[in-house]
Image (cartoon, helix red, strand yellow):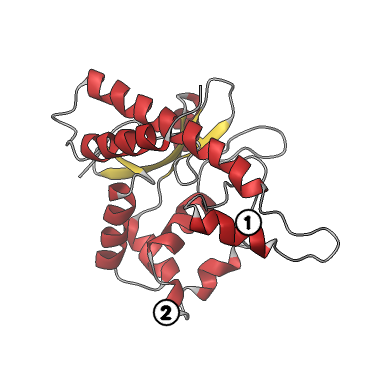
Amino acid sequence: MDITEKQYHKSLEKWKELIKITDNKITNKQIQEQQKCWDIKKRYEKQLSDTADRLKANEKQQEVDWEELRRLKKERKLDPYWYDSYKYFVHLKAGVINMSRIADSLKNPTTLLFYLLQWRTWKDESGKIKDALGKKWYDAGYIITHRAQEVMALDLGVSERTINRWIKQLVRDRLIVVEKVGLQNIYVVGLINDDGLESYFYCGDCPVYRGQD
């Protein structure tokens, strides 16, 4: 059954309220409600892809069907294009991190997210993980990085205070989860799903498993 726009917005508002709850107050039932709201959101956004497909460029002229575009806009049915995480990829070279040290426009939380993904736990061609700590977490179902903040600051050309502020922003937006192991921070960027595939918070593959302030 299709999700209506009213159901979507109602679920979205409930989701926004639930993610404001701090860790020490959230219950298992509320976590399940978060997941239910997230599923409704994903189903509705998938429906929108059908609308977006109607706006394909004219194959011969490579032009947008402007009449259709104006009609959808007038009827308030013009929706953002749905990008499939497993189909569409934007490939970034790691050099973007070098550029962040000299380009002010790249000094932001998004570049830090790129950096954390660059240093995430990964398997080599033989399927092995050389990082012992990363392997321990990966085997438990978590994709992590554990770079020290002072190293992040040096690599990105900013202060540790700035790095800390960016981390808090990424946590607030549910793009990463920070775990503490003794005095060390572990940055969780994704999970291993039931099929054994990697899924990431940043692209909506999966919601974070708990909220943080």
Residue at 57% over, 46% down: 82
Residue at disc 1, secondary structure: loop
Q: Are marks 1 and 2 in contact (CB under 8 Å)?
A: no
Toward the right, the furthest residue is 60
- Closer to the eye: label 1 or 2: 1
Is residue 140 visible in the rendered image? The answer is yes
Q: Residue at horizontal 49%, vertical 31%?
A: 43
How far separated are the C-alphas under marks 1 and 2? 22 Å
Q: Amino acid at mark 2?
A: Asp
- The label on residue 90 is 1
Q: Residues within 10 Å of mark 1 (few under 14, many from 20)?
A: few
- Picture coordinates of residue 68 (x, y %)? 64, 57
* Residue pictured at 63% horizontal, 56% vertical: 90
- Amino acid under label 1? Val
Q: Position of residue 155 (x, y in %)?
A: 44, 67
* Image location of residue 57, percent across then percent down: 74, 59
The earlier-in-sequence mark between 1 and 2 is 1
Residue 149: give x, y in percent of width and height. 33, 58
Q: Is residue 95 above or below residue 49?
A: below
**Residue under the point 29% across and 44% down:** 184
Q: Which residue is mark 2?
A: 104
Front in this rendered view, residue 133 or 21:
21
Q: Residues within 10 Å of mark 2 (few under 14, many from 20)?
A: few
Q: Does 107 sit above or below residue 150?
A: below
SS category of the residue bearing label 2: helix
Residue 181 visible in this rendered orientation of the protein: no
Residue 45 falls left or right of residue 11? right
Give residue 213's quadrant in the image: top left
User: Is 180 placed above or below 141 here?
Assistant: below
Query: Which image quarter: residue 201?
Result: top left
